[in-house]
Image: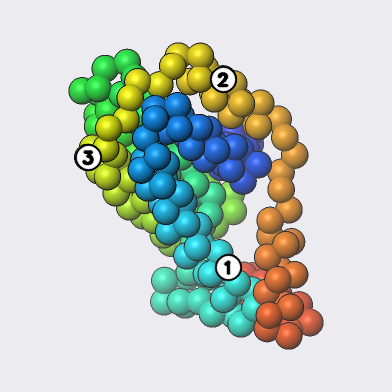
């Protein structure tokens, strides 16, 4: 298990700024279609995570055979953002490095998801589900990027983006689970959200 401080990197307080930085980089690369592809990727990855959490919290939907209640948003975020960020940075240094860098980042992201997130907040099945979703989103986005004319991103824009992500690691964690609990109970009419521990018992 990694030091506790490193879990900040998969929190939404860091991941949302990272997603925004990638969007700014794509704009700086003068490719509106790449930006659109990124926004679609974000929607396609975040929506299943949110729906799985609402379905469990509001109605207790899960897969007992897999010990799976939700898709881990932390694992999905860590995989998606790390792979895309690393590939975009490598592309600026030497375009031929973009895919080797993406695969190396993918290995690190899975290691992080299975050894940190699974040990700290989710069972392995949920971490795997999140890593799979993030992997699919990242690789499909990077494959789509191959057919688009993305220009070189100015070094200053890259540096500012990395500094912004670094600064976000000092931000307080967002109470996303509390917000989802409230939304799930409002939609389902239950007095309280389902809890994973009670569901497993």
Which disc number belongs to residue 75?
A: none
List x then y, in percent, for residue 188: 68, 83
The secondary element bearing badge 3 is classed as: loop
Q: Distance between the residues labelled 1 and 2?
A: 34 Å
Give the labeled residue for mark 3.
147
The secondary element bearing badge 1 is classed as: helix
- Give whichever of 152, 173 is nearer the camera: 152
Q: Name the residue rendered at 56%, 41% in the picture.
A: 15
Residue 125, placed above or below residue 107: below
Task: First in sequence, mark 1 or 2: give its number.
Answer: 1
Question: Which mark is in front, 2 or 3?
Answer: 3
The secondary element bearing badge 2 is classed as: helix
Position of 90 compared to 16: left or right? left
Give the labeled residue for mark 2.
160
List x then y, in percent, for residue 60: 59, 80
Residue 35 visible, this orientation: yes
Q: Name the residue rendered at 48%, 20% in the picture.
A: 158
Task: First in sequence, mark 2 or 3: give its number.
Answer: 3
List x then y, in percent, for residue 172: 75, 39
Question: Which mark is in front, 1 or 3?
Answer: 3
Q: How far apart are marks 2 and 3 (CA)?
A: 27 Å
Residue 112 visible, this orientation: no
Q: Name the residue rendered at 25%, 43% in the picture.
A: 143
Q: Quadrant of the C terminus?
A: bottom right
Residue 23, placed above or below residue 131: above
Which disc number belongs to residue 53?
A: 1
């Amino acid at each position: 298990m990694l030091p506790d401080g490193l879990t900040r990197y998969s929190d939404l307080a860091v991941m949302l700024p990272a997603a925004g930085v990638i969007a700014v980089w794509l704009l700086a690369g003068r490719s509106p279609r790449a930006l659109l592809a990124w926004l679609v990727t974000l929607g396609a990855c975040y929506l299943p995570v949110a729906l799985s959490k609402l379905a469990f919290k509001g109605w207790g939907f899960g897969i007992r055979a897999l010990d799976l209640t939700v898709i881990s948003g932390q694992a999905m975020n860590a995989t998606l953002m790390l792979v895309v960020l690393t590939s975009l940075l490598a592309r600026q240094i030497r375009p031929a490095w973009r895919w080797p860098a993406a695969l190396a980042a993918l290995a690190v992201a899975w290691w992080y998801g299975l050894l940190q997130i699974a040990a700290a907040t989710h069972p392995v099945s949920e971490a795997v589900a999140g890593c799979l979703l993030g992997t699919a989103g990242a690789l499909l986005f990077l494959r789509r990027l191959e057919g688009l004319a993305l220009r070189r991103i100015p070094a200053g824009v890259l540096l500012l983006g990395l500094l912004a992500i670094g600064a976000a690691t000092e931000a307080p964690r967002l109470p996303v689970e509390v917000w989802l609990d409230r939304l799930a109970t409002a939609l389902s009419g239950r007095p309280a959200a389902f809890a994973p521990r009670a569901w497993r018992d």
